[in-house]
Amino acid sequence: MFAIETKDLSFAYSARYKAVNNISLQVPDQCIYGFLGPNGAGKTTTIRLLAAMLLSDSDNVFIQGKSLQKQRREIFRSVGMLIETPSLYLHLSGEENLKIITTLRDIHPKVISEILAQVGLTDAAKVKVGKYSLGMKQRLGIGMALLPQPQLLVLDEPANGLDPNGIIEIRELLITLNKEHGKTVFVSSHLLTEVEKMCSHIGIINKGVMKYQGTLQNMKETAYASGEVLFKIPNTSEYIHTVQNAFPQARQVSQDEMLFSFMDQQEVTTINRTLVNQNIPVTGIHVRGGLEDWFMQIIDQNNK
Amino acid sequence: MNNYVNAFKTEWQKLKHSGTFWICFGASAFVPLIQTLAYFFADIGNGRQDNDIWNSFIKTNFTAFTGFFFPIFMVIIVARVVYLEHRSDTWKLLETQPVPRLSLFLGKWGISILISLLCLLGVLAFALIGGFTLQIFKSKLGFEKSSIDWFIVLKAISRYWVASFGFIAIQYFLGLWNKSFALPLSAGLVATIAGSILAGFGIWTWWPYSAPSYTSATFSGSLTGQMLMHQEKMSILWATLFLTAGYQLFVRKSFVKAAFVPFTRLIASIFTVLIFTAMAYYINKPVELKRYTRTVVAGHIKSEKPVLSLVVLRQPAFDTILNIPVVDGNFHGVINESIDAGFYSIGTSAMTIGVFFGNNDSTYLELDANKLSRKSTISGTRIAENEYEKKNDENFVLSSLTNFPYDYKPEEYANQLLDIWEDGLKDINSFKTADNIMPAQDFRKVQEKLLAIRLLKLAEVTYPQVFNLYNPNDKYQFPKKLDKLKAYANINDNDLVSYGSFTDYMYETIRSKSGSNDSTYFALVENDIKNQQLKDVLYFKAINGTLSKLKDSTFRNYYLNRFIRYIKNDKFKNKLYATNNRFNNLQRGKLAYIFKGEALNGAEMILAQLANRYVVIDVWATWCGPCTKESPFFEELAEKYTSDKVSFMALSIDEDKKAWQMKAPYKSKKVIQLLAKNEGETFTTAYAISTIPRFMLIDPEGRIVDANLPPPSNPEFDNILNREIPFLADGNFSRFKRSF
């Protein structure tokens, strides 16, 4: 059973353009799932669909095995959500905002102070939220999602507006929740590095289409699987034939650049050692590819 | 249910620090504050003590508040309550909680109508504070002596509350539809302003924003005893429709998805709108009340003097059809004979009112005959008919056509009459009471006929007279386009006999054929008219008119004996005999009726005290305009002629003694100022006084010289005095005596 599963989920705001197109999310239980995509990729639309704030035309969203269309209320009993900017009543204090959740959910208000401590807002508990900084609002929003102690947390860009320290704190909090309390966390982000640092699973979306879905490990393997390495060699043409005997894939790209494609990073070492052994003057090595490049390549595919 | 309670509680928590309760407090304090100041400084209610000042003060507060401020206030509140969620899209927060959407949706609705109730109760509270303040600091307004009718006040408050549901639901819907603050707010403001204008004209009574105005119009509740009236029922219907629509919008997030897509939803929407329209039609459709099984006149009368019985009199002859005993102010009488629907006089010497009813009508009267608080309420099966009579919207054009016919060309005059006729038909048939009751068919038919008769009289009598005067060579043609009115004026129409305007019209129509010749007139009536009652009225009118013109008693007696046998109704006969007797008694040489009066110092004075001198009498009243014009001429002669043998007297027939006491002392000291004791109209009857001013001359032996002198502004008045009173100009009566 997946914590979140969608089957060919689609949604269009207007007839011409599908904001989300046949997305099949599969978020395993007890993982931290990074939902990655550039701005406007359809992340928030997807999350709104998960929150039933946008309605899918068919019964194709399942959370913890329950149909969102049919069992909305039961699902939300064990799900905490933060969607886009945090939803806060600006004229109330942080404490009063949390009080609204406890009243609606019939939770004992004593948890409020624990949550405030957890998100580091104890000192600002009585201050009106309208006076909070962006980061404080973000933390309160996360606190509101955490308050019912949900099994599944859905957070839309939780690092938005936080300073580096804040980002680290949130990251550590989420990791703790996952590791120690066994909670499933679904985080959307447009920052690869952020996701890479905490997620066990990754989904990549661009222009409403799911580009990749799998574990972080898998992704790294895929990303690094097909790399290219550029060797800077003055007067490349002198050596190209020699090199091509050993590495048929070698190509001369300019007067002093030679490009090798490889399937395994180990190959870079081998190529380098071979060139050095043959006294070919290497002045620079530049490995292209890796996660970042791979990611950029994936999300730009449609453009090229 | 628990979910709803929680949703409602959170709404309450959210309103903290939002200033809503302060707005509520200010809004409900505003009107009572202004009213209290107005009562305090502007002396409202001064001079005339209001026996019911507590109730009228509370009613004034609510009327002033609810017509405009209340809807505006609720529009603002609802906009705030909804915008609270739009501001930083906290809908996201609410919707991701395990709470049914219906609870969330109704939570906001609940808090909105709770504020509406708080606000109304606030007005009551501040009105009470204001009233008690006035009671302490402005005791002459009479708050101590009156009390609050809590049943009516609380019922009115709950009705105002229900009346607010409709527009609150609409504002809620608008707020959900449009996420801005300003747009639903300004739409609400415009709708409220439109509502108060519409209510002013009394049109579009279903418009939800004017519902409180209509509740104000019936503050003391329905005359038919319903808890809610059409505007409140309509408000509930509006609320149901817009809450349903609002909830669909809330769940589906888009108007199109809420109403039109998919096809089944479109069908459901159409169906809902159809049901709404049908119910709205049913609620707004005026009701005609059903007749009862018997003809009953019942009710309650309050009076300073004990009332033992009431009489029901039939017009035009005022025959008594029922005498109802009154026990402890309550009365209940059943009329067993079959009676025509029409106006009947019901009352006692203390108070008489005209009431429309007919066969199998149940009439309930609430009469207050106390001088200060005199009022009457008619309910029962003819509510609308009696309400219709009360409305007094005189048509401006019609009065211009009546008073200034020479301003119009014939064509123009006819067109104006036709316009009035068409508008009048619409008015008659669209009239309904605040209770949404319309007059029964028989009454509407009669009103149409009366209008036709009124217009025909203008076209057939008033205008031709003027036309012939200005165009002696042309012949006036009755306009063809008005021919259709003639169908409404049938001389043998039994329904109209009790209406003076009909009998007057018939009288004049027949007179225009007969001229002043009574024999011809009587023959025409005898031949053309079948209804004996109508015949009697027409005979009576003719005889009564001629009697007042005949000065010679022998000839008058002869005339009366010759024509009175035509009349069947004894009441009419007796009236004519009585009139003739009075005229006879006012003949020269008859002993004058010895009236009593009260002098300015409070002493009683009788006519006999002025024996041995001529008495010139001016009968007047403070409210009579022409009297005031004549009195300077009268006083001038009094200054000139008053002596030990001639007295001038101004005899007031005012009922309001205070008014007389205010005015009489400032009149000429030569004139004896007296207030006539006219209980039961004994004085005015004895002297056949139907109009004032009236001038009379009585001789030293208490005999009548002339009971109807020309007015003193006419030189003939002075001439008569000089002719009748010897040596008047000398001012010395003794010389006259010696000369005999």
Image (spheres, coloured by chain):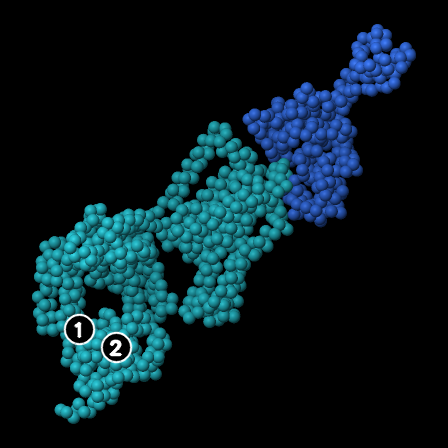
Chain colours: A blue, B cyan
Mark 2 — residue? B618
Give the side of residue B126 with respect to residue A95, left or right.
Answer: left
Residue visible at 72% across and 43% down?
A133
The quarter of the displayed image where residue A89 is located: top right
> Where's residue B349, x and y in %?
28, 68
| Residue type at the position of mark 1 | Arg
The quarter of the displayed image where residue B709 is located: bottom left
Residue visible at 88% across and 16% down?
A282
| SS at circle 1 | helix
Q: Is residue B613 above or below residue B421?
A: below
Q: Residues within 10 Å of mark 1 (few under 14, many from 20)?
A: some
Mark positioned earlier in the residue sequence (1 or 2): 1
Q: Residue reaching furthest bottom?
A: B738
* Quadrant (top left/top right/bottom left/bottom right) for the N terminus of chain B: top right
Give the number of the disc on residue A281: none
Q: Residues within 10 Å of mark 2 (few under 14, many from 20)?
A: many
Give the side of residue B697 with respect to residue B364, left or right.
Answer: left
> Where's residue B277, x and y in %?
41, 39
Mark 1 — residue? B582
The quarter of the displayed image where residue B336 is located: bottom left
* Quadrant (top left/top right/bottom left/bottom right) for the C terminus of chain B: bottom left
Q: Is residue B573 visible?
A: no
Residue visible at 35% across and 50% down?
B432
Q: Is residue B728 above or below residue B307?
A: below
> Where's residue B705, x and y in %?
17, 80
Nearest to the eye among marks 1 and 2: give it: 2
> Are the residues flagged by discs 1 and 2 from a single subunit?
yes
> Where's residue B89, x and y in %?
62, 39
- Chain bearing mark 2: B
Residue visible at 17% across and 60% down?
B537
Q: Is residue B451 visible?
A: yes
| SS at circle 2 | strand
